[in-house]
Amino acid sequence: RKASSVAPSQPWLPGQGGGQPDLSSPHMTSISDPLTLLREFTIAQRKIELHGEHIVFGETRFERAAPTAYRASGKDRSFYPVDSLWFLLQNADRPHAEYIKECGAQSIKAVSLVDKAKVLSYLKGGSETSASIDIEHAPVVQSVREPHSSKAADEASKALLPEEEEELEASRAQAAEQTKLLEAQVLSARQVFARVMDEPLGVASSAGGEGEADGEATQDMREQADKPMVAARPFIKADFSATKLILKRERKLRTRKTVLLASAASSFPALTQVLETFRKKNEGTLLKESAAKASGGHPRSSAAATHQRQKPPSASKPSAAAATLRPLPASKQAASSRPGSIIIVPSVVTSLVSLWNAQQLLQNKTWRAPIEVKQSGESKPSSVRLTHTFEDGAQGFFTIIDNPSKLTARDWERVVCVFVQGNAWQFKGWPFESPVDLFTKILGVNVRFSDEQPNQLVKGWTVKSLVLSKQKTKQHEIGVTTMMFWQALHKHMACHKPHLLQRSSQHH
């Protein structure tokens, strides 16, 4: 093929030499970069409109969700869509809080406060380029010409050579034939569907040759009905990219994880009733066993049992005495005879977990920054005591402190957990040679926010990492984090210090 006599214009990209493109040039609409068009139209104060799902630049339009070459700051480093930058220009003078609220109402991705000033400066011509512009890795975006732009295409086609005009006419004729064929197939499928729906039940099963003829006709109908879908597959494939952009903008309101997390209930009347029934049954069994031991360990004969029933109420004191001999529950005996376990938290108010909020996090499954609790006027406790029942029924009695300098050697044997802040000086003066030696005997826990990078020093220690979210919409995940903490602590205590887990007699 011979080259066309009309050379396509090359788009001007940020950072290239040769100055900026002339907006009055007839080839201005061939620029395929929406970021460049948006900047040039803004500098020249030309009108940019939103028509349905398209952003219109004169005779060129882009889908509003089409990505630009400007990357967002932060973790995802995604490309801003063209409607986000256009909407920012429309609301440049509004307060950022109102702008964010309006973006949510319009389902438009908001430009972050970090990027806002840089984006406006670049789009309005205040700066020539930006470090966030990534032309090399930006997705290729196809522009759409306005309907009245066919005049320029006709002028370009006039400059084609005769051989090219023949090929162009042949391709147009072939496209017209394919369109007619597709319309005929769709019409045929509609007719077949209408005939099948109008046909009463049982007609196809009539006897004789009519049944076989109807079967063959039905098979032909099915084959004809499948042809439109085969022909429509290229169109479905062409719409895949647009559909993918629409799905990308969707926001999940509910997932399997959020459905499973229910609010904590304070009472369970049905379970309480079942447990009360078992308790009364067990008490009756214990009374009978105590009475049998008091009578010498031999079962009473039927005569003795009859004599016992014939005694007046005043004579039935052995049963009351047996009741007084009943032992106390094992949990109460353990609580009165065994000291509790110790958990150490950092003493600084900048730590995510301290005495200011330890009980709220570990017991109430809610989290507030320690500095917020301090500023609200609440006083800092010297220590926090709490009780936790693990999944296997074992109980743990814990004392939370932040001043381990007062602990004795015997107290250090009861330390089961340390919340790690991320500094080695936190363990200064502790009776351990190194953090490695510390975390072989005591469970280490490090808490950080989900948008923070892990501490490099903590990564070299054997500690349990827990993650909290700053977003209020994800506060329900704090319950999951708390559950993971208690599971890790239970596993550590069962392996290294099982004597600090207290169990009732039913579990022995």
Image: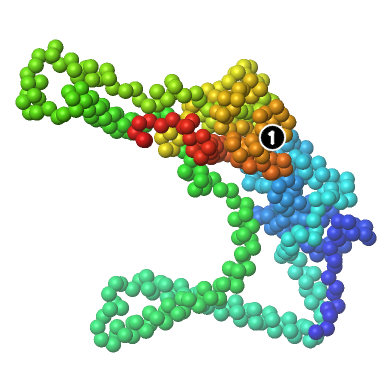
- Which of 43/482 is in front? 482
* Quadrant in which residue 482 is drawn: top right
Measuring from the top left, give residue 455's x and y in whole percent. Answer: 71, 41
Residue at x 63%, y 46% (from the top left corner): 107
Left/right of residue 306 with respect to residue 423 in the rendered view = left
Q: Is residue 507 left or right of residue 384?
A: left
> Farthest residue in the top direction?
314
Q: Which residue is mark 1?
A: 433
Number of numbered discs: 1
- Where residue 53 sits, quadrant-wise, is bottom right
Quarter of the image with the C terminus is top left
- Residue at x 33%, y 85% (from the top left corner): 213
Q: Nearer the viewer, residue 88 or 14?
A: 14
Q: Is residue 380 above or below residue 57?
A: above
User: 189 above or below 292?
Assistant: below
Q: Nearer the viewer, residue 187 or 65?
A: 65
Residue at the limit of the structure toward the front, as seen here: 296
Q: Is residue 328 left or right of residue 264?
A: left
Identify which amino acid the numbered label 1 is placed on.
Glu
Q: Relative to 165, is 402 on the left or the right?
A: left
Per the image, label 1 sits on a secondary structure element best described as: loop
Question: Which residue is at the far right?
Answer: 18
Q: Residue at x 28, y 22 (%)?
A: 326
Whether residue 131 can be seen here: yes
CA neighbours of label 1 inside 10 A, class few (<14), some (14 to 19), many (20+): few
| Res 345 → quadrant | top right
